Amino acid sequence: MSASPGLSPIPATDHKATVKGEFVIEPLGDHDRPAFSCGMAALDRFFREKATQNVKRLLESCFVAVELRARKIAGYDFFSEASILAKNLLPDVLNSLACYPVLPAASLRKLAADLGYSRKGVGSSLIANTALRVINSDAKALALISQPKDKNAAAFCKHHGFIRSETILYRFSAALSGQESSREI
């Protein structure tokens, strides 16, 4: 499998991905979180004060995009397993899954990029990385869902192919349903 210009493929046992040769995406560890600022006080505070607790409690996973040269956090995401009620799906999707009242999903819970790395593909790479982690997991998911907190986040999700439902934004992906032949993004 050849490397793509964006995110490199992630073997099931690897916990790091290199993004465009400038960043590495890795599990949250001993990183300089106080230096991170996305411009939203609630997200910055959560990342500084609560991130490690939620990971240790197994509530969600956190991955950070770290600039290789400066070792500075460029962005982060939190995701977890989730489920969605079939009745919340669009009718054309629901028709083929009507016998299942609840379906497995992965939830993109939080996503932020440091102001110094805004519009440099960090958020896009983190979403791609999350999708690859879901694909490589033994716990399967039909969709990657998100519940954006504001108009900018909703526009970002829409730009990345998330489809709006009555209650959630969700994305059905050939990659998440196992129909993609390559796992490179």
Image (tube, grey):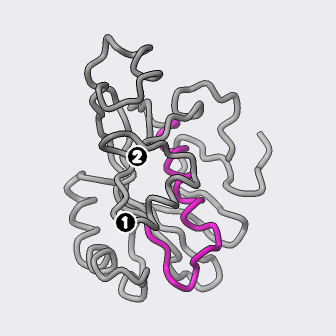
Find out whether residue 36 is within the magenta segment.
Answer: no
Classify 142 as above or below 59.
above
Disc number for residue 169:
2
The amino acid type found where label 2 is placed reads Leu
Magenta-drawn stretch, dominant element (helix, strand or loop) = helix
Q: Nearer the viewer, residue 75 or 9?
A: 75
In magenta, the rendered stretch is 112-136
Find out whether residue 124 is within the magenta segment.
Answer: yes
Q: Position of residue 94 (x, y in %)?
A: 39, 20
SS assignment at label 2: strand
Give the number of callouts.
Answer: 2
Q: Residue at x 66, y 46 (%)?
A: 9
- Mark 2 Cα shell of 10 Å, populated few (<14), some (14-19), many (≥20): some
Q: Position of residue 24 (x, y in %)?
A: 59, 66
Q: What residue is pinned by disc 1?
A: 150
Q: Residue at x 42, y 62 (%)?
A: 77
Q: Residue at x 58, y 55 (%)?
A: 159
Q: Position of residue 55 (x, y in %)?
A: 28, 59
Q: Which of the 4 image quarters holds residue 52?
A: bottom left
